[in-house]
């Protein structure tokens, strides 16, 4: 409602703006004068002394800014609009109060005269106001007049037509008001309010009329859709923007309401007749959406409308098919209708409409796949329940095998057909282009899911389902191995002979595994795991499946020379480990005996790793072997003698691996395993002396330290001998302090004395400190009983006195003691 103000108001605004400009000009001129003075003083030669020198050094002072006039917080047009709107609202409230409260105090003639006069005055007043240029005031008065017409219609029903049905009268009144307001707005083209108000009122007549005649749900839905069609036509043809906005909102609102009602009627239809009537309503809604998409000016809006129209069309046709087909064919019938949208071609439709129809078809296919996913989940997760019922007996068929822990979903017999159909559509749709490899990967996954659920859907025999899954595993693994050697291009895979030889870095990067390769490899692993879990029902099936998978993945690892070898080799070793455990269990072996059989896997992995040239495959094989070794250790944990043997064998395998130049660090793990094996063996013999545990570590450690110092003379004695000596001296010292007999302290003291003498002889700091410290502590331990006995015979004041005398003596000779301590530190520092 912002318009040009009256001349007097506009003149006041212009004077205010001119005053602001004058004030700003004065401020800028003052600043300009100051800048000119600064420039002139800078260009003049500076005197050596005098007042001019002092003035040149005077700092610049900014001119005080001119005072800014205070601006009003609200503009004049804004104040005008607020006053006009507030006045119109107050007059409207007064008119409503008069009609509802004070109406009964007047007669019929008085009532008609008052309402007629006020309404005529309110509707006629905008004419002279527009001639004077007061458009905002005219809009306010016109709004009041429109409200008064509504009150006139209400008053007419209350006085003259009280017996007429209120809903029917409201339908006729809203239709008449919409026509009158539209005519009034067209006659006074300068007013903006009557036309959108008429458009908003036009949403009600048809809906109120079908409610008044007590029509059924189908008729009410049809009224909503017809109203939406009318709104769509107005939104696409009327040039007035405000009318288009109201019509667009009405079209989306009534259209969405009508589509939801028609969809509910289609879903609740119990026969072909009801389904056909609901389908007709949905077809009307689809026609409205597609027609709007055809004529929509914006491409994005056209694509969205075409998408909506396509989905509604599928719902209409699928609803009719659903009424005559079994429940299991509901999703396939809708999928068929969605695929039919892809056949809509021709240049007579805009590209945006074609794109929207393709999106709607893709949406239907995605929903169909989502409907089938719960069945795939049941087939994959259901056999996990056999882990608690291992070898309890083979089930009767494939469906019983997968529903051991989860129920079978109802009406899902057509899920394999849906998955296979969507896979075929992907292959046919993306026969070229940059997204071909991704689409083929998706098609491969859908085809795999269809094959996965097919045995349980058809209730095939248990052995037949295992055989089918085994063939699927071999097929996907072969596809992964073959696709790695194929050259992937936009036109499709070609033979290796047609592939250009990689001669640059870009060509080398193109040989990375394609999405199809990775998808096939992942599906092969997932199928093999599902097959293993499913085979747990029977002993023979478990052994046969594990043996077959071990051989299959081993064959692919031997055949394939690139990335797939790492995964295949690791999978083969993993299934070999499971086969060893299953074989031992089948022979009724104890777990610690099975552990010895499992050790064949890490030994084989170590031998294979030494022959492989690919670092990725070598690492995957070694990791799998290490995991198998840990499993063997865990199986033998409850039997210490066998555990010691298993640890020793693991140490032998690790030592053999450490022979390779690139795996020298594994030698530390081998040494740790040998030590652990020794300790476990000693523990099983119930040996409690710590020296029996520490000396087997100390002797090799000292030998290694001695050899290292011979090769590298710069090696510190702490690095060479410190760890070995500490392993034995510290545990023995702790044991000696709690030992009341004399042999252990005597032997420990003797060993410490020998270590100290060797350290003094060879000038080795670690031996001197560790041996001397241990010797001193052993001596203190031997003197401790006598010291305690002597302290018991001495009066209590003697220890504090002796301590005081000691502190005085130390204080008196502090400097000499510091010099002696410094000399001792220097002597130790010169040792190695």
Image (tube, rainbow, N blue to C red):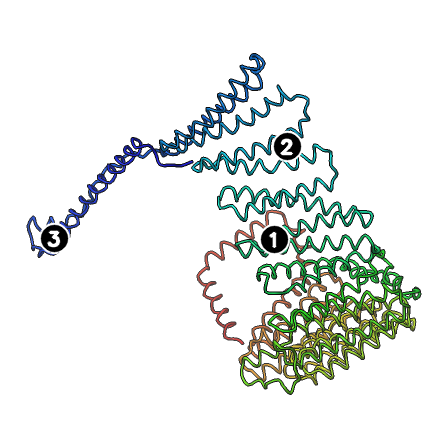
Of callouts 2 and 1, which one flags the residue occurring earlier in the amino acid sequence? Answer: 2
Mark number for residue 40?
3
- Residue 43 position, x and y percent, is 11, 56
- Distance, label 2 to label 1, CA atoms, is 28 Å
* Between marks 3 and 1 in the image, the one whose residue lies nearer the viewer: 1
Label 3 residue SS: helix
Q: Are marks 2 and 1 in contact (CB under 8 Å)?
A: no
Label 1 residue SS: helix
- Distance, label 3 to label 1, CA atoms, is 77 Å
Of callouts 3 and 1, which one flags the residue occurring earlier in the amino acid sequence? Answer: 3
Q: Residue at x 46, y 35 (%)?
A: 187
Mark number for residue 138?
none
**35 and 483: which is toward the camera:** 483
**50 and 323: which is toward the camera:** 323
**693 and 256: which is toward the camera:** 256
Q: Which residue is mark 2?
A: 171
Q: Residue at x 66, y 34 (%)?
A: 208
Q: Is residue 725 visible?
A: no
Label 2 residue SS: helix
Q: Which residue is mark 1?
A: 291
**802 and 287: which is toward the camera:** 287
Quadrant position of the N terminus in the picture? top left
Image check: 518 left or right of 100? right
């Amino acid at each position: 409602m912002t318009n040009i103000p009256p001349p007097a108001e506009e003149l006041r605004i212009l004077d205010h703006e001119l005053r602001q400009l004058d004030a700003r000009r004065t401020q800028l001129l003052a600043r300009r004068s100051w800048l000119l003075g600064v420039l002139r003083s800078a260009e003049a030669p500076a005197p050596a002394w005098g007042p001019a020198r002092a003035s040149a050094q005077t700092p610049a002072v900014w001119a005080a800014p001119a005072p800014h006039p205070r601006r009003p917080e609200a503009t004049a047009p804004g104040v005008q609009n607020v006053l006009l709107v507030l006045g119109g609202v107050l007059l409207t409230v007064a008119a409503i109060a008069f009609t509802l409260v004070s109406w009964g105090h007047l007669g019929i003639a008085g009532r008609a005269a008052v309402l007629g006069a006020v309404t005529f005055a309110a509707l006629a007043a905008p004419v002279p106001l527009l001639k004077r240029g007061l458009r905002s005031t005219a809009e306010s008065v016109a709004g009041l007049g429109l409200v008064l017409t509504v009150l006139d219609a209400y008053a007419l029903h209350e006085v003259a037509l009280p017996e007429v049905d209120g809903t029917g009268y409201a339908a006729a009144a809203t239709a008449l008001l919409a026509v009158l307001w539209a005519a009034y707005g067209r006659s006074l083209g300068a007013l903006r309010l009557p036309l959108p108000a008429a458009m908003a009122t036009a949403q009600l007549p048809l809906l109120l009329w079908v409610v008044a005649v007590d029509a059924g749900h189908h008729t009410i839905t049809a009224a909503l859709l017809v109203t939406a069609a009318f709104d769509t036509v107005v939104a696409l043809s009327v040039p007035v923007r405000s009318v288009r906005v109201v019509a667009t909102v009405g079209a989306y609102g009534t259209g969405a309401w009508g589509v939801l009602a028609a969809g509910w009627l289609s879903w609740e239809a119990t026969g072909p007749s009801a389904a056909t009537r609901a389908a007709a309503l949905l077809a009307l809604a689809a026609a409205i959406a597609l027609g709007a998409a055809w004529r929509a000016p914006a491409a994005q809006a056209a694509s969205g409308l075409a998408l909506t129209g396509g989905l509604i069309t599928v719902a209409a046709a699928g609803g009719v098919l659903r009424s005559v087909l079994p429940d299991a064919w509901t999703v396939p019938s809708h999928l068929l209708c969605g695929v039919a949208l892809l056949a809509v071609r021709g240049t007579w439709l805009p590209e945006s409409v074609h794109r929207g129809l393709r999106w709607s078809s893709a949406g239907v296919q995605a929903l169909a796949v989502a409907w089938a996913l719960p069945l795939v989940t049941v087939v994959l997760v259901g056999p996990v329940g056999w882990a608690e019922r291992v070898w309890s007996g083979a089930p009767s068929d494939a469906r019983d095998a997968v529903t051991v822990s989860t129920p079978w979903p109802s009406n899902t017999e057509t899920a394999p057909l849906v998955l296979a159909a969507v896979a075929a559509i992907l292959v046919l749709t993306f026969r070229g282009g940059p997204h071909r490899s991704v689409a083929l990967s998706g098609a491969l996954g859908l085809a795999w899911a269809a094959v996965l659920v097919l045995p349980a859907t058809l209730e095939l025999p248990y052995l037949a389902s295992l055989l089918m899954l085994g063939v699927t595993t071999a097929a996907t693994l072969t596809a992964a191995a073959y696709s790695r050697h194929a050259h992937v291009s936009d036109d499709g895979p070609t033979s290796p002979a047609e592939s250009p030889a990689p001669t640059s870095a870009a060509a080398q990067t193109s040989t990375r595994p394609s999405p199809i390769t990775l998808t096939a490899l992942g599906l092969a692993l997932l199928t093999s795991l599902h097959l293993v879990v499913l085979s747990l029902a029977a002993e023979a099936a478990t052994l046969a499946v594990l043996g077959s998978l071990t051989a299959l993945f081993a064959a692919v690892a031997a055949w394939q020379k690139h990335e797939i070898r790492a995964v295949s080799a690791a999978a083969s070793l993993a299934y070999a480990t499971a086969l060893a455990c299953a074989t031992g269990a089948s022979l009724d072996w104890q777990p610690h005996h099975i552990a010895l059989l499992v050790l064949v896997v890490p030994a084989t992995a170590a031998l294979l790793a030494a022959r492989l040239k690919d670092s990725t495959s070598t690492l995957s094989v070694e990791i799998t072997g290490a995991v198998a070794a840990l499993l063997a250790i865990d199986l033998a944990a409850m039997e210490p003698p066998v555990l010691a043997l298993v640890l020793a064998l693991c140490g032998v395998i690790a030592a053999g691996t450490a022979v390779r130049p690139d795996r020298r660090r594994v030698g530390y793990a081998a040494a740790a395993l040998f030590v652990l094996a020794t300790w476990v063996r000693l523990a099983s013999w119930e040996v409690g002396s710590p020296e029996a545990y520490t000396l087997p570590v100390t002797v090799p450690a000292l030998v290694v330290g001695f050899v290292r110092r011979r090769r590298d003379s710069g090696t510190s004695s702490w690095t060479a001998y410190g760890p070995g000596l500490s392993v034995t001296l510290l545990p023995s010292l702790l044991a000696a302090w709690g030992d009341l007999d004399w042999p252990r302290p005597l032997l420990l003291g003797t060993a410490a004395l020998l270590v100290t003498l060797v350290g003094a002889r060879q000038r080795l700091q670690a031996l001197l400190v560790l041996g001397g410290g241990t010797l001193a502590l052993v001596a203190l331990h031997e003197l401790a009983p006598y010291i305690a006995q002597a302290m018991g015979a001495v009066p209590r004041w003697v220890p504090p006195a002796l301590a005081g005398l000691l502190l005085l003596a130390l204080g008196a000779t502090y400097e000499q003691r510091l010099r002696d301590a410094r000399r001792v530190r220097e002597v130790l520092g010169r040792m190695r």
